[in-house]
Amino acid sequence: MNKPKIIWLNVFVFLTTFLFAAIAVPYRAITHGFDMAEIVMAVICFIYCGMSITAGYHRLWSHKTYQAHWSLRFIFALGGAFALQNSALHWSSDHRIHHKHVDNNDKDPYSAKMGFWYSHIGWMLREYQASRYSNYENVRDLQKDKIVMWQHKHYLVLSALMNFGVPLIFGFINGDIISALLLVGVLRLVLSHHTTFFINSLAHIWGKQTYTDKNTARDNGFLAFFTFGEGYHNFHHIFENDYRNGIRWWQFDPTKWLIKGCEYLNLTSKLRVSPEDKIEKAKLSMTLKRTQQRLAKHPNAELMLAKLQTEYDLVVAKLNDFYDAKKQLLANKKAELMSDVENSELHKQYIELKVRFNEQKKSFVTMSASIA
Ligand SMILES: [Zn+2]
Ligand SMILES: [Zn+2]
């Protein structure tokens, strides 16, 4: 079978920027050095590009996990062009297909089952899915967003303006155009490219399947550090409508903090989160599954499996009781049916159910962990 045609423009851009970053940047660092202003500017631009992709292209436009003021969308549209990852419309269309047909080598544009190289960068080097390239049926909603369409229409000019304009203006002011082009222009772009690409490659290979094993996506705190929080990719693939990827307060997810922070400034609204009970259930069912797999080789497998199942059924029952009480309590609070919520019978019941659920969860998790 003939391989699809090579996309020479992409090959040229990826290769030349990479070579400049790998050879010219270190050479300049040794022979000339970079000053603090150049380093700080490169870091700021790297963060700007990365967050425009994660908060803008990904969580806002691809998944609609929140709504954003036009000014913020405008900032993301410019940052996305700066990151040189195609228009928001095209990116989102690809990404929605990735979620819908994840790991399907014929449909997923960057299927992880095609291997590291393909899912990282290879998929952009040849016309693998040329037939659907301009089919934007799955992003009709985004076609109503004037900023998305404006960026899509003028993408080439905008990306050239951002990638050359920002380093040139900065270099002119700072007094060293070559250093600015190398650091703020090229190195920033290459790092921004590959950290994003890691989400399609490494985040589908390396890490834990905390919530589901129906696809290759993994949770990886180390990767989250370099990808503005997107390393919690297993959670993201099962709860894609959630504006968070790292859902615990201690999980490194600056994109989540940005979206939440902007809510206080009235720049973002309608932040969507997944129901806590569904998240808990997904995690518990994966713990059960992993323990069952480990138990298969155990001499007493049948008896142990039955015991484990009993513990699991109990934890799910208690989880349902607890979350039912929680929902009831919240509904009453909302309807202002109770004058003294803290001292109500329902609140006492809720606390009691919470304790019982947590005890049972601990017992189930301890039992699972003891089966090595
Ligand atoms: Zn996604
Ligand atoms: Zn993915």
Image (cartoon, grey):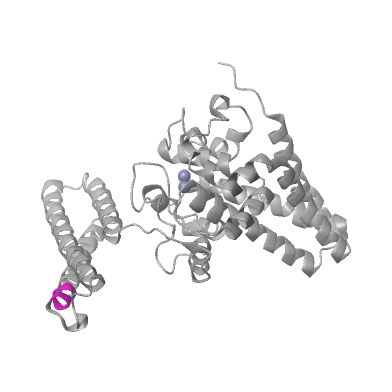
Q: State how many labels appear.
A: 0
In this picture, is 8 found above or below 361? above
Residue drawn 52% across and 34% down?
136
Residue drawn 37% across and 50% down?
209
The reply to whether the magenta stretch includes residue 347 is yes
Residue 349 image-quadrant placement: bottom left
Q: Position of residue 59 (x, y in %)?
A: 49, 53
In this picture, is 183 found above or below 11? below
Position of the N terminus, as image quadrant, is: top right
Position of the C terminus, as image quadrant, is: bottom left
What secondary structure characterizes most of the magenta part? helix
Comparing 123 with 321, the one in front is 321
Residue drawn 79% across and 50% down?
164
Question: Which contiguous range is marked in magenta?
Answer: 346-350
Comparing 293 with 87, the one in front is 87
> Is there any visible trace of residue 253 in the rendered image?
no
Left or right of 35, for residue 364: left
Comparing 301 with 129, the one in front is 129
Q: Position of residue 351 (x, y in %)?
A: 18, 75
Residue 6 image-quadrant placement: top right
The reply to whether the magenta stretch includes residue 345 is no
